[in-house]
Image (cartoon, grey):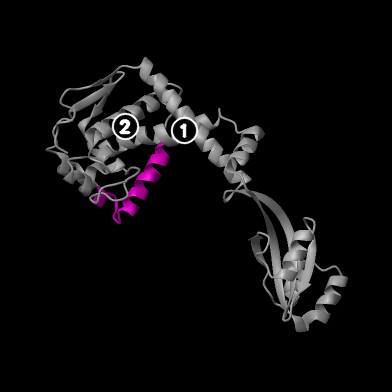
Amino acid sequence: MVSKGLKGISCGILLLATLVASAFAQKLVDKVIASVNGEPILESDVKLAELFYGTQDKHKVINKLVDVYLLAQFLESRGGRVPEEYISATLMDIAKANNTDLEGLAKELAKEELTLDDLKRFLEKELLSTQGLSIYLSKEIKVSDLDVELEKLKRGEVKLRRDIDLLVLDKKDGEKLLKMMEERKTLQDIARAFSAKVESLSVEKGDLVEPLDKEVWRASLGSLVAAEDGEHIYLAQVRDQKEIYSGVSEDELRREILAKKIEEKRRELLENLKKKSFVKIFSDAYSFRS
């Protein structure tokens, strides 16, 4: 997603004007490459977008920036903005991702004739048009039970998975264990008494040793079951049961449906904005040197 020169750039940097002012003293005035409803897209924006999106295809980059500006303007018109503290935190993450500090990152930007202000301006638009838009749309979009059921039908086979707490003891401890179970001790109490550890597992039918597997799958939720084989005694508390569709739980399924709906709404919104907006890309936009 990023070039080798600035690996990991996906969000911004804190301003270090006093440290890097001399490095940018000779920087020429930014050239206007395009405009979206009168707001300019600058040459520095395109250079940063090439790094951010990992491509030097200027047609692709400029078209992407037009989309970013349209969506950002839409949210700005509704009071949306990226909090300054969030941008500051994100900028620090970029420096760390590049195995440098902010001054070092500023020097890398200087090699491309870019400033920290350029990067911050670019990131404000990018973050607002992506994360900000997702938050905005997620408040409007709902995932109904019908949506989930239809998706289940599309995905076909359903698997059941049970969450259990499991304690494995040596068979020689059977008498002591039996007494504790008669006293209705909890699984955790029994584990402490034997200085043993309770494991939390998520299992499907057939995952456990056969005697235990049968008990776990015939028990009701919340039950404590026991089984044994030649060497061990097994105690399992059945905590929960989930339906899994193509490897995901119902909660994950809902998140996937929501993400799909958000993307569909984003494309629809973008098409409507393009019809109502004035976008101008200047004739020499694709000819400047990166």
Q: Residue 183: image x %, image y %? A: 87, 71
Q: Residue 150: image x %, image y %? A: 62, 35
Q: Is residue 107 above or below residue 143?
A: below
Which image quarter: residue 252? top right
**Cα gap from disc 2 to disc 1, whole angstroms:** 15 Å
Residue 135 magenta: no
Q: Which mark is residue 263?
A: 1
| Left or right of 104 in this view: 90 | right
Q: Which residue is at 57% across, 51% downward?
A: 247
Q: Is residue 104 above or below residue 186?
A: above
Comparing 34 with 39, the one in front is: 34
Q: Which residue is at 58% across, 43% downward?
A: 155
Crowd around label 1: few <14 · some 14–19 · many ≥20 (10 Å): some
Residue 15 in view (yes/no):
no
Which image quarter: residue 131? top left
Kindly identify the amino acid type of the residue bearing the numbered disc 2: Lys
Kindly identify the amino acid type of the residue bearing the numbered disc 1: Glu
Q: Which residue is at 68% across, 60% downward?
A: 205
Q: Residue 178: image x %, image y %? A: 84, 76
| Left or right of 52 in this view: 288 | left
Residue 220 in view (yes/no):
yes
Q: Secondary structure at mark 1?
A: helix
Q: Is residue 73 above or below residue 99?
A: above
Precedes in sequence: disc 2 or disc 1 = 2
Residue under label 2, please give it: 64
Comparing 154 with 274, the one in front is: 154
Name of the residue lying farthest toward the bottom: 172
Q: Residue 204: image x %, image y %? A: 66, 59
Q: Which mark is residue 205?
A: none
Which image quarter: residue 191? bottom right
Comparing 17 with 70, the one in front is: 70
Q: Which residues are magenta?
A: 83-105
